[in-house]
Image: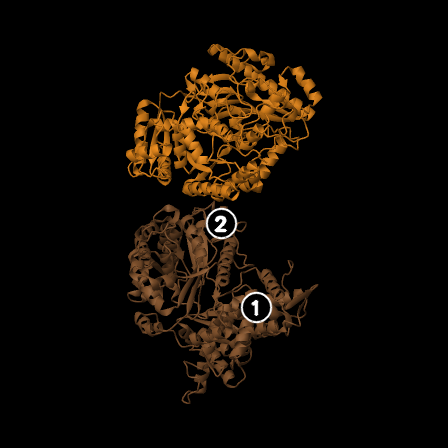
Chain colours: A brown, B orange
Amino acid sequence: MKGSLCTEKTPEPGEFTDILEERRRNSDLSYALRTFSPQPYKGHPPTSASALHQAVLDSHYLRYVTQEVATESGEPVDVIREEAAGILEEMSHNLQLSFIRLLGYTLSKVFKRVFRRILVNEEGLNKLQQAIQEYPVILMPNHRSYVDFLVLSYVLFTYDLSIPVIAAGIPLMGMKLIGEILRRSGAFFIRRAIGSDKLYWAVLSEYVKTIVRTGSAPLEFYVEGLRSRTLKSLNPKLGMMHMVLEPFFKGEVYDICLVPISISYDRVLEESLLAHELLGVPKPKESTTGLLKARKVLEDDYGSMHLCFGQPLSVRELSKGRISRSQYNLVPRDLPQKPSEETQAFVSMVAHGVVRLQERGVVLSPWSLMALVLLQNYGGLALDSLAQRTAWLRGLALKFGALLDWPAQVPDEEVMLSSVSLHGSLVCCEEGRVFLLDEQGSSAAVSSVSPEEAVLKRAAVVLMCASYRNQALHVFVRPALVAVAMPTAPSSRKEDVFTQFKFLQELFSNEFVFVPGMAIQDFEEGCSLLLRCGALQISGQELTVTEDEQEIASFLRAILQPFIQTYQVVFQHLTVDGSQVFTERQYIPVLRSYVLKLILAGELHTYEALSSDTQKNVLHTLLRMEAVTKMKTGDQSKFIVNKADIQRIGDILAGRRPAQSAAFSRL
Amino acid sequence: MASNGKSSERQKIAQQRLRIIAGHLRKQEELDHTDIAAQECKAESNSNAATPNSMPRKRQEIMKWNGWGYSDSRFLFNKKGQAEFTGKRYRLSGLILPSLKDWFEGTFGANLQHKSPATPAINASAVHPPNLSESFVEELKATGIPFSHDTEDRVFRAHGHCLHEIFALREGRFGRCPDMVVWPNCHNDVVKIVELACKHNVCLMPYGGGTSVSSALECPPEEKRSIVSLDTSQMNRILWIDEKNLTAHVEAGIIGQDLERLLNESGYCTGHEPDSMEFSSLGGWVATRASGMKKNIYGNIEDLVVHIKMVTPRGVIEKSCQGPRVSTGPDVHHFILGSEGTLGVVTEVTMKIRPVPEYQKYGSVVFPNFQAGVACLREVAKQRCAPASIRLMDNEQFQFGHALKPQESSIFTSFVEGLKKFYITKFKGFDPHQLCVATLLFEGDREKVLQHEKQVYDIAAKFGGLAAGEDNGQRGYMLTFVIAYLRDLGMEYYVIGESFETSVPWDRVLDLCRNVKERIIRECKDKGVQFAPLSTCRVTQTYDAGACVYFYFAFNYRGLSDPLSVYLQVEHAAREEILANGGSLSHHHGVGKLRKEWMRETISDVGVGMLKSVKEYVDPDNIFGNRNLL
């Protein structure tokens, strides 16, 4: 196992194999019913769901907390214990092999219809197989689509590996029948807003920790917390991560193995749903009938899906020199304890690091790169120049360490055309020109549509297109931030550029995932990638963009433009046009109509500014940077704007004033 | 020396008291000791001591200079490839152990063809010549206390029994050795030696049984002064027995087996039986806070000691009464207990004694797995009904124990096969690779023992334990005494190993055992050890709030360029793991120099400061310069 989150070099994922190929050749039924005998952890047979249930209820930790809650609430302990049992009932998985078989059968049918190929790296699976026998294993996939949810179980079943139990959101449980099927396929359900419900936390954490302690099954959870609506990585949630790691901190297991898994799609099933959600069309509640309606979706072609199983990580190795396990020596381990600062920092580092490794393992389709080019050319461009630009970008991406699924020995133009046809709902190619559609195949504007609606329709396409670009952002974001920092820093001295870089990183840390405390390494990485492609030269302490490769720098800057512009627009709204105080509910609608107005007036060309995701990120960033403060009055939260602060942040972003210098000693 | 006047005054008082006590004793019973009173003690009168001297001054005459124990007792593989144990001293002596070879080769991947023999004899030229303080030697001669600077005598006292120490001897490598050895015959001799050492600034290192496993006897290489090893072996008399209060006053150089034997003759015992009791000394027990196998009945050394006399550079320290418990500030005995020879020499100890028990019975219980065994021990501790000894061996150690079965077994069934057959037929449903065994020793009135036995077996049954006979129990305890001999056998065939211990709260016992064993295996693998090591543990003592755990680890070092460094790194990692899992730095082996790097985190800065200030007051010139502990 690997003991470092260092991502300087992307580990070779090995060859990818299409698991559907075998499915297309042989009977799904005999596949589903075949002998399934995975090698369990330490040779012990997995714990049954009911034994797990009992172990949690009997735990000292839960007994302690129920007692505490009873004392606080004044209710009898028995009532609280019953409540705890109820929570556990609602939560528990009920993994049964027969359901996995059923699922294996059904998913084979569905996947074959929807996907051309499902590609997995068998080398990663081999390592996983090793790890499962020796350690409690935590499977940590990114979350881009509902399809992710069971595909891992499907792959593990296919390869005769232990079926994981999966942390899922409660809404999934609400779906009739499906909820029960998922439960029996290993899902356990977690409420969305737990807040300060002490009992719930206790039951959940004991449940999770017991799974890890006994190693009864691999545990799968989404460290990002939820499905990314933008296909960009999300900053990790730390609660679950902490629960998972605690058995190691407390010496209850020798080690824990974390396996980052990167799932990527040529085309995501819910692409249009996601875009509309971002534009403010509310997302339909997860329901069984909704799913049935989605059957139309299943008629379409979604290309390939990639699952890249990353190098297993040893928590023991990662924690060397960072965590002193003896900190638990003086208090019974069963008692709830506030994690120490070093523990919190470590958990955060691991969680962010895993997201970063997930990014590294994402296999990109040509379409992701085409989207990058297309979004810089809203009006469309000629097929041959699209092909040429994309091929150029491919070279750059490879230099930056991206994993690409680029068909071998196919002319570039053909690759373009095949991507265009796969994404026919977004782009089309007419008379040798490739351009974005307005919406659902209607390139010609229908007169009955209002100008606002037209903008929104256009925005939907742009946002869908942007989501595919987003899948590739991690490849470029560090050098791009350096490229943006250079002209906006007060001088070309390395120190000043770094200060500006660090400011940008902090500003956009809700937008892109950075491991906390690694700014220097990120900066060095950005610089070294620019050096590698010849776009940067360093003489002494001076950083300059080379004459020959101006194009790279400006291309990289352009990648970040939609974000920079959106942030500036929001700043402008808050400082100039908006009111000083607003409520949570007002923020998005008011901002949306403001942006819409600017676009209609031709003053703003960035349709991405309409994305509620980015808009929310700006607000969170300003809160974090204390340029906006949150006040709770009753049920309502109010935000108070500090216009001067926002003005200052906007000025630094635009390079009109210098950022406060950051610690720079190690450069 | 500043304290000269004071100490001689104290000496006078002490001598007077001794004379009175001796007088009482003579009146009461026929005592053979003519030299009971301190002032009569003369080095020359050594020969007329009543105690038969089982430890001669020239220890190498009966003991190995580069291995464990008696020269006549050792394991070897005979021409037929069968293991046998030589000599006549032990139950195993002269017996063939048919299963040992299979176990040995199977466990370590060792091969009888691949030998790693030791250097046959001490090459005197490899030992640096003694650095003698002539003035000290001169004055010492005048006292008549015997001493020597013979190479063999010096080499013998330059080490304890850590693996690295024995390994170096076998390779004929000698580090810094004591420059001379002195054999005081009584407390007063020690007083004289300490005075002379202070006067001439000579470094003293007390030497008792030499069984240290903490590098405590290693001479600090940076020590420039002459180092004198103070061998207490000739101070080995029981000075009196007080039958009214059930105490015995004993010279601290006496070794465990002599103490028990002599007390037995009078119908008494101390019941203090550390695994090293054949060789380790009373003074050594006090200096290291020793623990005995039967501590559940008799207590550990700190419970057994009533009075201690220690000679320090500041003078003699002792309490003025023998009250069974006192409230007179912090107990000064606890500065002495565990001081590891850094403050002075323990010369005489008053110890509790008990009548020899009427009845002894071994027993054993087989559990389906280690977890069940630990749960049972915990329950036994909870009910406070632990027998004199209760130990739980893990599966590997259980198999190890079986490999030492001397009986004839069919040559057609391999060791593990035979084991499987036996246990599957006898203990249905027990996995022979999971089961483990607890060994028991009951002591007391026959009737009470039988009652007690039933109580313990009833508890065991609740945890799935099945009684497995006296034989298994007895063999378990036998293992204790021969394990160190076995290490020497291993070293003949490229196998090196060590044992170490800790104490840990009950709730962490299982986690600690698992993690430490696992750590050892992984560290060995990482460091290039070809064959998986033996990594095994047992729970050897139970307390109200926790247990003592003992680990054995050994591996085949063929193919390693620097096996010793690998071994040291693994042991270091194992200790780190113990500490990370809530275990203590040591339950009874002590700190010595091997574990002193962890003292600060173990007892805090202030704790270290306290110990330092005591050292600075008691021994400002670092006469007792073995540099243990701090």
Q: Give percent across and percent down for residue A13.
A: 48, 59
* Residue on which disc 2 sits: A316
The numbered mark, 1 or 2, whose residue comes first in the sequence reads 2
On residue A396, which mark appears?
A: 1
Q: Give percent across and percent down for residue A197.
A: 39, 60
Under mark 1, the amino acid is Leu
**Closer to us: B475 or B277:** B475
Assign the N terminus of chain B to one quadrant of the image: top right
**Closer to us: B414 or B553:** B414
Give me the chain letter of mark 2: A
Badge 2: how crowded within 10 Å, few (<14), some, or many (20+)?
A: some
Asked whether residue A497 appears in the rendered view, the answer is yes
Q: Give percent across and percent down for residue A441.
A: 41, 81
Under mark 2, the amino acid is Arg
Q: Give percent across and percent down for residue A174.
A: 32, 66
Give me the chain letter of mark 1: A
Asked whether residue B550 appears in the rendered view, the answer is no
Disc 1 secondary structure class: helix
Q: Marks 1 and 2: CB-CB under 8 Å?
A: no
Disc 2 secondary structure class: helix
Disc 1 with disc 2 on a shared chain: yes
